Amino acid sequence: MDNLYSLTANELLALMDKRSVRPEDIIESVCSRAQSVDGKVKGYLSIDREGALARAAAAESRAAQGKLRGIPVAIKDNICIEGELTTCASKILRGFRPPYNATVIEKLKAEGAVVLGRANMDEFAFGSSCENSSYFPTLNPWDTSRIPGGSSGGSAAVVAADEAVMALGSDTGGSIRQPAALCGVVGMKPTYGRVSRYGLIAFASSLDQIGPLTKDVRDSALLLGVIAGYDEKDSTSVNIPVPDYLSCLTGDIRGMKIGIPKEYFVDGMDKEVDAAVKEAIALLKDKGAQVSEVSLPHTEYAVAVYYILATAEASSNLARFDGVQFGHRCEDPQNILDMYERTRGEGFGAEAKRRIILGTYVLSSGYYDAYYLKAQKVRALIKDDFDRVFKAGLDCILTPTSPTPAFRVGERSSDPLSMYLSDIFTISVNLAGVPAISVPCGFTKSGLPIGMQLIGDFFREGKILRAAHAYECYTDWHKRSPIL
Amino acid sequence: MSIKDDKVKYVARLARLKLTDQEVSLIARQLDGILGYVDKLNERLDISKDVPPMSHPHAASNPFREDKARPSAPSEAVLSNAPQKKGDFFKVPRIIEE
């Protein structure tokens, strides 16, 4: 039998059904795996082995029928867990222990899942490489001289390295899908409003969504089904029923209408990424998908729109970190203004400061119309692009997830714009609000994972899961594991 | 549009954010690059006035909960993360002059 840590949640649940494995065995296996490899990957900020074992024993008796009974899950450090350190990998929240659980944590617990540890991230989810963590950078399990992607880099890396069976991340401009692609795992950003954001420390409230990072599509469907649903505590969550996502997985692509947007195959894209995605398109066509070229003409403006709207919202959301109610406060403030300014100057890292300044600038008097209002209008045009192609009958849109495979540590950290452009294929999805999933679709010659993205219409997660799962049935990229 | 250091200092004051002189000039330089890129919205795209600005993916409506009293979080829990507290209050430097 394989090591338990290498199995998917669905495989482990089947073993537990046969009573050949206990939840404690799974926790032990995954914890010792993490102990032996996390020194290289550095995906975790903390692992709570003893607590996880105790919770696994409790889960076994309490939630014998839970959909995730005994499954260890890593949680990105920006999702609140009652009484547990939750810091957004930021100095300004060092020591913060939320007095409540995020709704997704309540939902995981109700289904018997076991929170194993806190996954590293770019500070406040600002970044695409996990280098902006105020603790330490996480490294790519496939090549530890490279970044794992970000901002949910820790979540993606620990799933890829078999240090967690599944993980939760958050995605504002690609922060689940891009690290999933770069680490060779499956990452899904649900429709805006599908999953409650209550207890997710806000970055850009009109774009943020929590979503699953998993070893395969079946696990993604399983975890999404647990965390999705209306929540009265999040006024932007949408009250429509959650379908049974597992039953959407037919293993067959025949008849599905897939659009290929020409704007996503651009000059300067990595040749191996381009070739792998085109090969995947040819395979799906061969298996009976109806593939056609489509156009999303406002794609080229997405990064510009995003960095106006996301920083504007972030500058407003981060106003709450002022040294009054929680987190860091500077020593010996002279007066209240001094306290605010020094607390924030000391507590925020370089990228957070840059985004606060940019966001405040585009909202400031005299620039609001030229930047913020204009960006909101172009956002509407980007959403219209998606509405138009889905109304014409497409089931999903297929694109590369990231224009390149994982880049080297330090390669882009001194040039913010080049870092921002690594999200060029993922950002439009957040601006429109539609769901998308990234699945492994190949490897470079040097052994780095490549991911492709399937985008669906609003609340049609079932369709992109079906297409992604069918692709998985035809290929075995998702079964490869890094050697650590 | 070129961003001068004093502009960054002004915005930092609005954002209640203390920056060192080195941070100010670094951010000024980087914002030049970013805003230069972002300016393509103004240079290349002609938007007719009738495009409504989009602030949110779904049609905005304000959800109301039932107007019924319910307990809020205990003040002990809310104060547990306070950098400084006094009794049932968050303690901050004096705001009103004596």
Image: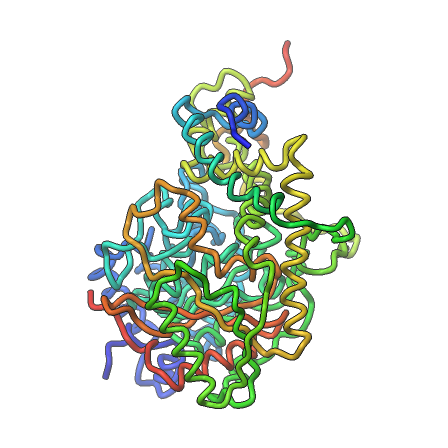
In this image, A394 relative to A57: left or right?
Answer: right
Q: Nearer the viewer, residue B93 or A439?
A: A439
Camera-nearest residue between A231 and B60: B60
Residue furthest out toward the top: B98
Quadrant in which the N terminus of chain A is drawn = bottom left
Q: Is residue A23 visible?
A: yes
Q: Quadrant of residue B11?
A: top right
Colouring of the image: rainbow
The residue positioned 38% from the left and 42% from the top of the image is A415
Residue B24 image point, x, y percent: 44, 26
- Residue A138 sits above or below residue A342 on the image: below
Return the residue nearer the eye: A336 or A254: A254
- Residue A366's spot in the image, x, y percent? 67, 31
Q: Is residue A407 above or below residue A372?
A: below
Where residue A179 sits, quadrant-wise, is bottom left
Task: Please tell me which residue is depicted at 41% across the width and 78% down the height of the picture.
Answer: A280
In percent of width and height, residue A66 lies at 48, 76
- Left or right of A318 in this view: A449: left
Residue found at x 57% / y 80%? A244
Regarding residue A87, the answer to whether it shows in the image is: no
Quadrant housing the C terminus of chain A: bottom left
Query: Foreground residue, B1 or A208?
Result: B1
